[in-house]
Image (cartoon, rainbow, N blue to C red):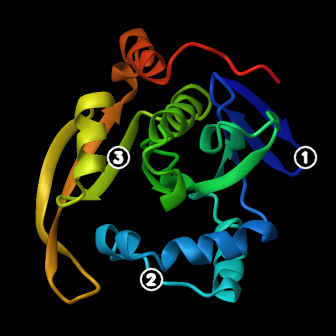
Amino acid sequence: MTSTLLPHGLVLFSPDFRVKLVLPGPEDDKHIARLRSIPSVQKHMPLLPALTKDEATIQRELRSQDPSILDVAIYARATMLHEDDEDGESYSFAGVSGVFGINAEHLACEAGIIIAPEWQGKGLTTPVLYTLLKYMFEHRDMHRVHFETSAENVAMNGWLVKVARARLEGRRRKAWRSVGGSWVDVNGFVILDDEWDESMRRSLETKMGTKRVLL
């Protein structure tokens, strides 16, 4: 991973430069508002209400001032989406990720990710969360990174178990209320710093593939 600490924030690249994580800016507000209105997002993340662009702006500005939160916008190389695109250097908005509830005393936080529908199935989850986890464990010295996801979110549960080898710590029964009013169970997974070892990193790197995209 390549990381650059800039005066105005942090920029993180995945090992193959397929994705870039940046602090959200005003240009991302409309994209984030669109994400929050997508039915699949509301289904699997019912705690996240739909937002207007103006509300997304207010939320971004407030969250950026909270040291317990690190929000990032996901940008992916356009050539991943359009294989015939001759512009091999461009990145497009592809979703959001980040951590919240950062506890400096207990070195713990919770992570999350939302991939835009047009980028789903394009192999972004692994490079995004690899890059985020590497930063949190190796640069922020986290001891514990927690994930919560709807028990009905088959794709995310599968990634956490099969790809990240995260440990299922428990299920909270009927913990989230869906948009339709029904209750859904929530699975809680965790990755500890001593589990973020060479074996796990290599497994995720193999999943991503080792070929670098030349800039």
- Return the x and y of residue 212 as percentages of the image width and height: 67, 17
Residue projecting furthest to the left: 173
Residue under numbered circle 3:
146
Image height check: is 24 above or below 130? below
Q: CA distance from mark 2 to mark 1?
A: 32 Å
Q: In the rendered image, which quarter contains the N terminus?
A: top right
- Disc 3 + disc 1, Cβ < 8 Å: no
Seen at 71% across and 67% down, the residue is: 65
Q: Which mark is residue 49?
A: 2
* Between marks 3 and 2 in the image, the one whose residue lies nearer the viewer: 2
The residue lying toward the viewer, choosing from 151 and 10, is 151
| Residue in front for this viewpoint, 2 or 135 | 2
Residue pointed to by mark 1: 7
Is disc 2 placed on a helix, strand or loop?
Answer: loop
**What residue lies at 33% left-to-right and 34% top-to-bottom?**
191
**Labels 3 & 2 near each other (Cβ < 8 A):** no
Q: What residue is at 87 percent from the left and 52 percent from the top?
A: 8
Q: Dot 1: what SS?
A: loop
Task: Identify whether 48 is placed above or below 161.
Answer: below
